[in-house]
Structure formats: C-alpha cells, structure tokens
Image (tube, helix red, strand yellow):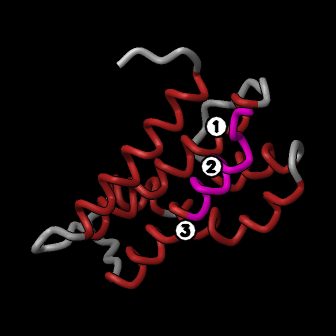
Amino acid sequence: MVFKDEYSELVFIAEEDLESAKILANHYKPKIEIACYHCQQSVEKALKAFLSYHNVKFRYIHDLEDLCNDCQKIDMSFSTLQKECKMLNKYVTQTRYSRNYLLTEHQMNQAIKFAEKILNIVKEKTKKD
C-alpha cells in the first residue's frame, strides 16, 4: 500500500495493530500477552501520527508517557491520557522479552479499550477538513 504522507501510514499501522490485538483476544485460546503488546504498539503509532499531523518530528522511542507529553505540548487534553499510557507502557518490554509476566484477560480487555480510546481521540483530533 502506498501512502501520501507519514500521518496516514502511521494511522493505518495503528489500526492494524489494534485489529491484530482483537483477533488475538478472540482466539479460542486468547494470546493475552501478544494482544497487549499490539495495543501498546497501536498507541505508539497513534501518538506519533498525531505529532506527524502537526509537523512535529517525533522521537523514535517506545515510551508512551513521553510521546503523550509531546502531544500534550500541542493539545493539553492529552494530559487526560497519562493513566492509559502508563498502563500500556509496561507491555512493550515485559511481553516481548519475558514469558514470566502473566497477564489476565481483564488486563487484555482493558488494554484493547485504552488503545481504541486513544486511537479514536487521535483520529478525531486530526480529521482533515
């Protein structure tokens, strides 16, 4: 798929990560840790898309709290997303590098809910006129 701009590509990838998380969550044997990882990735791409939309060169980092702080400099309402970003932040490394970190279906469902919320906020705030 060819994208006209970085923003569109990042939103597409964020949507794909969220869809992947939902598929993994609905598997007959839910893949909880991997679904949570995809939720973190979805939010990371969504926040970077918001920055890109506003012509802000984003940092190549995985820390959602830092990315949310960068978004907050453009739109203060992102301050209300810090709790969600903090919760999702732990899934970037703990789920990729350790199988000793057991998550619950409740945590997975909460991660999906938070990722949907943040992606929808980004898309709403970046609607092209």
Q: Is residue 70 above or below residue 113?
A: above
Q: Which residue is mark 2?
A: 63
Q: Residues within 10 Å of mark 2 (few under 14, many from 20)?
A: some
Q: Which residue was labeled with disc 3?
A: 114
Label placed on residue 48: 1
The amino acid beneath tag 3 is Phe
| Span shown in magenta | 117-129
The answer to whether marks 1 and 3 mark residues whose Cβ atoms lie closer than 8 Å is: no
Residue 88 picture location, percent across and down: 54, 64
Q: Earlier in the sequence, mark 1 or mark 3?
A: 1
Quadrant where the C terminus sits is: top right
Give the amino acid type for the residue marked by disc 1 in the picture.
Lys
Residue 33, position as x, y percentages in the image: 31, 66
Q: Is residue 112 above or below residue 62?
A: below
Question: In 3D space, how far apart are the residues under numbered discs 1 and 2 (Cα atoms)?
Answer: 11 Å
> What secondary structure is the stretch in magenta mostly built from?
helix
Quadrant placement of the N terminus: top left
Please tell me how crowded label 1 is: few (under 14), some (14-19), or many (20+) other residues with Cα within 10 Å: many
56 left or right of 37 in image: right
Q: Earlier in the sequence, mark 1 or mark 2?
A: 1
